[in-house]
Amino acid sequence: MASPAGTSPTDSPAPVRANTAPRTRRTDRWWLPPLLTTLGLATFVIYATVRSFMRTDYWAAEHHYLTPFYSPCLSDSCVAGSSHFGTPIGELPVFIPLAFLSLPFLLGFRLTCYYYRKAYYRSIWMAPPACAVGEPHERYTGETRLPLILQNVHRYFFYVALVITLINTYDAILAFGGENGFGIGLGNVVLLLNVVLLWCYTLSCHSCRHVTGGRLKHFSRNPVRYRLWTQVSKLNTRHMEFAWLTLGTLVLTDLYVWLVSSGAIADLRFIN
């Protein structure tokens, strides 16, 4: 077929969004997964925000349980015993969370995570909300402009997340030595489970997969890194599961420490 006058066969039209009218002909409940995702993410954000500003019942002194929402606690505002790395920072005003050094990086790590991008792009930004469903946006610029261009710093958040996960691991280890010496309680199990899943989520990150083997051109010349890349790749296939599981274990861990610290429940002890 001949090309229109003044154009060549290689010319392509200006990029526009697909026009679906009506919005969709789907008759199933396509809106349910985006709705559940929105509710799940919103529940976690609300809970974590409230708890981060409460400044109470985050340290169970008898058993040395520290909630991850307040770790590391480096201010003079922290209760005695909860500052595992000292208090190099003075008193903080009430509008600054006690874990202000870690929370912004953890939030950035989660927000820029490849899975969470997929989750909130579909459920909140509706780009698109489901297959064969129209979206409200007329243009699509990808991650080339503000604010979405900031997604490209995910790899740097990953490095900080590694450090914070190490700190959470240290907190969980210290919790085996309470005021009465070495002991194991249900709180230790909860803290340890949370740390294990946090490691699974962090190491299954796409950035971790790239760090271990993304730049290699010859796997045969780098057998150790190839082995690491293989194991990380196996974890990577379950990144979505770990993303949701860790939201649940973070809330569970904080809630348990909250209840024990406030005296609402007593820690179930197995040893000492």
Image (cartoon, rainbow, N blue to C red):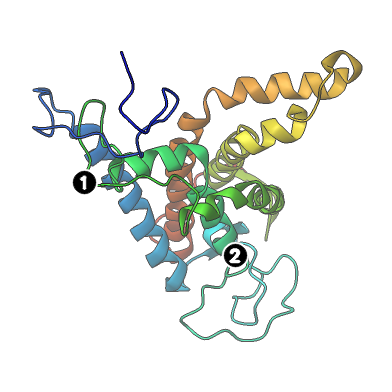
In the rendered image, which quarter contains the N terminus?
Answer: top left
SS state under label 1: loop
**Rendered image quadrant of residue 140:** top left
Q: Position of residue 88 (x, y in %)?
A: 74, 79
Residue 269 appearing in the image: no
Residue 31 appearing in the image: yes
Seen at 52% across and 30% down, the residue is 239
Left/right of residue 244 with respect to residue 1 in the rendered view: right
Inter-mark Cα distance, 2 to 1 = 52 Å
Seen at 12% across and 23% down, the residue is 26
Seen at 18% across and 34% down, the residue is 31
SS state under label 2: loop
Mark 1, residue position: 136
**Rendered image quadrant of residue 66:** bottom right
Say if 243 sits above or below 66 in the image: above
Give amino acid for label 1.
Pro
Q: Position of residue 179 (x, y in %)?
A: 67, 61
- For disc 2, the neighbor class at 10 Å (few under 14, some 14 to 19, many from 20) is some
Query: Which one is nearer the viewer's eye here, 188 or 210?
Result: 210
Mark 2, residue position: 61
Query: Which one is nearer the viewer's eye here, 175 or 148?
Result: 148
Point out the tag, 2 or 1, that comes first from the N-terminus. 2
- Residue 180's mark? none
